[in-house]
Amino acid sequence: MTELRELYQETILDHYRQPRNAGRLADANRMAEGFNPLCGDRIKLYLKVEEGVIRDARFEGTGCAIATASASLMTESIKGKREDEALRQLAQVQRMVTGHNGGEMGKLQVLSGVHEFPQRVKCATLAWHTMKAALENAAAPVTTE
Ligand code: ZN
């Protein structure tokens, strides 16, 4: 279990130091901003959605290791997925980080350790809620409060 935890930690640090899909997406057609005042995490998410499929995803922002790694993992995970599949993943992540069984999570399983740190749950879910807002094309910034 300790080894597994270390592996998870390593993956999170890797995504924090070298976030995947970082930056602006020039031809995005959905955008949303998210803010987690508890920690100060900020994210601006750009999506390119065509015919209900998320073709591309990029993000900008400043946040803690968990928030940044989660955004990186999220953009990786939702690319190529249908909108409803991406939203189903949000629900799974939400269950997992609150200590419930999220089902088969693949790589996202590395976020599961967050449930031991309730004050970190919003760091882990910020990017996911922002993704939902982007899909709904919400104009107002998302806050986790
Ligand atoms: Zn945070």
Image (spheres, rainbow, N blue to C red):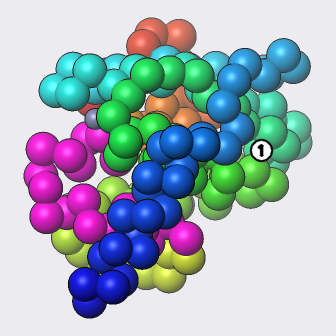
Q: Residue at x 13, y 64 (%)?
A: 116
Q: Residue at x 45, y 10 (%)?
A: 140
In the picture provided, is 144 more to the left or to the right than 38?
A: right
Which quarter of the figure is the C terminus placed in?
top left
Q: Of residues 105 and 41, which is closer to you in this image?
A: 41
For the view shown, which residue lies furthest in the bottom direction?
1
Visible in this render: residue 136?
Answer: no
Q: Picture coordinates of residue 16 (x, y %)?
A: 48, 43
Secondary structure of residue under mark 1: strand
Residue 109 at what x, y percent from top left? 43, 72
The amino acid sitting under disc 1 is: Ile
**Vertical arrangement, residue 48 with respect to residue 118, above or below:** above
As drawn, is 125 to the left or to the right of 107? left
- Residue 110 in the magenta stretch? The answer is yes
Task: Write the residue at 81% across / 48% down.
Answer: 53
Q: In the picture, which quadrant includes the N terminus?
A: bottom left
Q: State the residue position of label 1.
A: 54
Is-magenta flag for residue 94?
no
Q: Mark 1: few, some, or many residues within 10 Å (few <14, many ≥20)?
A: many
Secondary structure predominantly adopted by residues drawn in magenta: helix
Q: Position of residue 86 (x, y in %)?
A: 61, 54
> 3 and 115: which one is in front?
3
86 to 138, vertically: above or below: below
Q: Position of residue 67 (x, y in %)?
A: 38, 39
Residue 94 seen in this snapshot: yes
Q: Residue furthest top?
A: 140
Seen at 42% across and 13% down, the residue is 141
Work out whether 81 lies above or below 141.
below
Q: How many marks?
A: 1
* Residue span colored magenta: 107-124
Determine if the C-beta at disc 1 is less than 8 A from ligand 1.
Answer: no
Q: Quick check: which quadrant has ligand 1?
A: top left
